[in-house]
């Protein structure tokens, strides 16, 4: 029961906290036994967000050491979470306990249930797939062997692509890959079990890498991120995609990462050259509290006396509702952030603590407000209006805030143009040089691919 209650709650809050788009979710909603295999970058967010999307109940697995306290163990079990022990948490004696976990997985698959396992067996905020462990392969082949490969277990690789994993209101594109049937490996497994398990693990790694943005050299992580910020829009525009969604943006991110991987191997001097331009450019924009989209041709052409007037009206009439909505909804978010800032040491757990604590605190905060209104005014009508107004203004501030930031950004740019026009002109020249170099790199990369 708790599983389904929380599924409803997180479906609401996560869709407010994040911009989510999903592709091919139907691959995990079949009647066949399915093992969902995502990359792991964001602690509790990763399994929670997949669990809330799937129709079938999913069995999750978490680090075995968190099950030591009885109350925690009961809570996790009620959420359909079982322990998975790793060598780094307790040595070989703890890992041996996984025999029971493996049997549980096998039993669930034999009952046509959905199981979710992280093949990397580690949570790291990196834009690459770590070398997969063999545990998943052993489990699925054990299950198939039990029924002489007549069960047809489906392995679904999943790519969790975050624009910024540690930040609330970031973008998440979740890509479910085409299911892999173990029937294709039946003959090989019967001939050589160990070799087939190793081969399948490598094959799964390849399929998972197709679902995510892969930056081969960690030293290029920042470069790819900065290129994405300024160049995805132009790449999409160049190919005529004016109504891009997260799926389209993710495909361009893959190409940008592929382009950087290509030049990093063949012409590292080119990588150094673009770094020397784009990193200082981004740092300068941040110091001026500006964003690159303000320098787009269409953004500049759209600036006029009329747009300034309408922006002014939007701020003037929109701010009162924004501030009221903030008073009604912001305290839980504020205290959750303060707690996460103080207590969370690993970046992989930051968003999990911040986001989940925010909605946990919001529910009693909402109840307290309703109780106060009821006791003070003793009016069912007013209570009903207030109860609807709080979540409505919650949604309002989430959508109004980025609009407000863009307007203030435009005003900030106009003020800087008046105060120091030469500095803005230098930025625009640097931007054109960066785009010219990226255009050339893109042409070379795409020509080599074709």
Image (cartoon, rainbow, N blue to C red):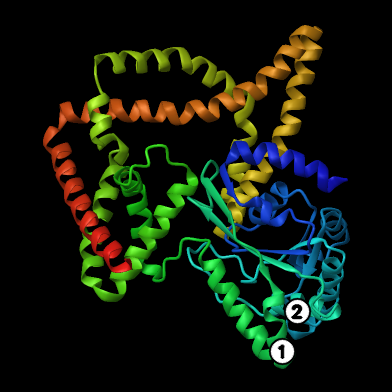
Label 2 sits on residue: 141
Residue at 60% x, 63% y is 40
Residue at 79% x, 68% y is 83
SS under mark 1: helix
Residue 320, percent across and down?
A: 51, 15
Quarter location, residue 153: bottom right
Residue 209, percent across and down?
A: 51, 67
* Viewer-proximal residue among 304 and 194: 194
Left or right position of 157 against 429: right
SS under mark 2: helix
Q: Is residue 46 visible?
A: yes
Label 1 sits on residue: 193
Residue at 60% x, 49% y is 340
Residue 441, percent across and down?
A: 24, 61
Q: Is residue 98 visible?
A: no
- For label 1, the crowd category at 10 Å Cα-Cα, with few meaning under 14, some 14 to 19 and many 20 or more, is some
């Amino acid at each position: 029961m708790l599983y389904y209650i929380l599924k409803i709650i997180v479906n609401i809050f996560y869709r407010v906290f994040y911009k989510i788009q999903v592709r091919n979710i139907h691959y995990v909603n079949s009647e066949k036994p399915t093992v969902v295999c995502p990359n792991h970058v964001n602690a509790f967010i990763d399994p929670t967000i997949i669990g809330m999307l799937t129709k079938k109940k999913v069995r999750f697995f978490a680090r075995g050491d968190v099950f030591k306290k009885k109350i925690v163990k009961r809570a996790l079990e009620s959420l359909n979470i079982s322990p998975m022990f790793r060598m780094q948490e307790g040595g070989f004696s703890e890992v041996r306990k996984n025999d029971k976990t493996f049997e549980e997985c096998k039993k669930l698959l034999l009952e046509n249930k959905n199981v979710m396992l992280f093949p990397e067996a580690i949570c790291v905020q990196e834009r690459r797939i770590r070398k997969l462990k063999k545990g998943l392969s052993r489990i699925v082949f054990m299950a198939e062997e039990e029924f002489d490969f007549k069960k047809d277990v489906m392995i679904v690789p999943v790519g969790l692509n975050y624009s910024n994993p540690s930040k609330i209101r970031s973008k998440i594109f979740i890509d479910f890959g085409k299911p892999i049937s173990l029937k294709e490996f039946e003959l090989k497994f019967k001939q050589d079990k160990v070799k087939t398990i190793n081969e399948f693990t490598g094959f799964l790694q390849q399929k998972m890498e197709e679902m995510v943005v892969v930056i081969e050299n960690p030293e290029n992580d920042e470069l790819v991120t900065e290129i994405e910020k300024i160049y995805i829009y132009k790449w999409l525009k160049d190919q005529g995609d004016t109504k891009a969604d997260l799926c389209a943006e993710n495909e361009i991110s893959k190409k940008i990462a592929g382009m950087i991987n290509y030049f990093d191997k063949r012409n590292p001097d080119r990588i150094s050259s673009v770094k020397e331009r784009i990193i200082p450019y981004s740092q300068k924009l941040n110091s001026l509290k500006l964003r690159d989209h303000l320098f787009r041709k269409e953004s500049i052409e759209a600036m006029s006396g009329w747009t300034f007037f309408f922006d002014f009206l939007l701020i003037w009439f929109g701010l009162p509702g924004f501030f009221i909505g903030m008073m009604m909804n912001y305290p839980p978010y504020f205290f959750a952030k303060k707690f996460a800032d103080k207590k969370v040491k690993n970046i992989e757990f930051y968003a999990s603590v911040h986001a989940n604590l925010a909605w946990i605190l919001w529910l009693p905060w909402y109840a307290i407000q309703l109780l106060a209104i009821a006791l003070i005014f003793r009016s069912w009508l007013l209570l009903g209006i207030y109860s609807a107004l709080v979540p409505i203004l919650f949604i309002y501030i989430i959508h109004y805030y980025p609009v407000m930031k863009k307007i203030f950004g435009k005003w900030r740019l106009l003020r800087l143009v008046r105060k120091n026009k030469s500095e803005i002109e230098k930025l625009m020249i640097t931007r054109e040089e960066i785009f010219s170099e990226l255009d050339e790199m893109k042409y070379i990369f795409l020509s080599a691919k074709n």
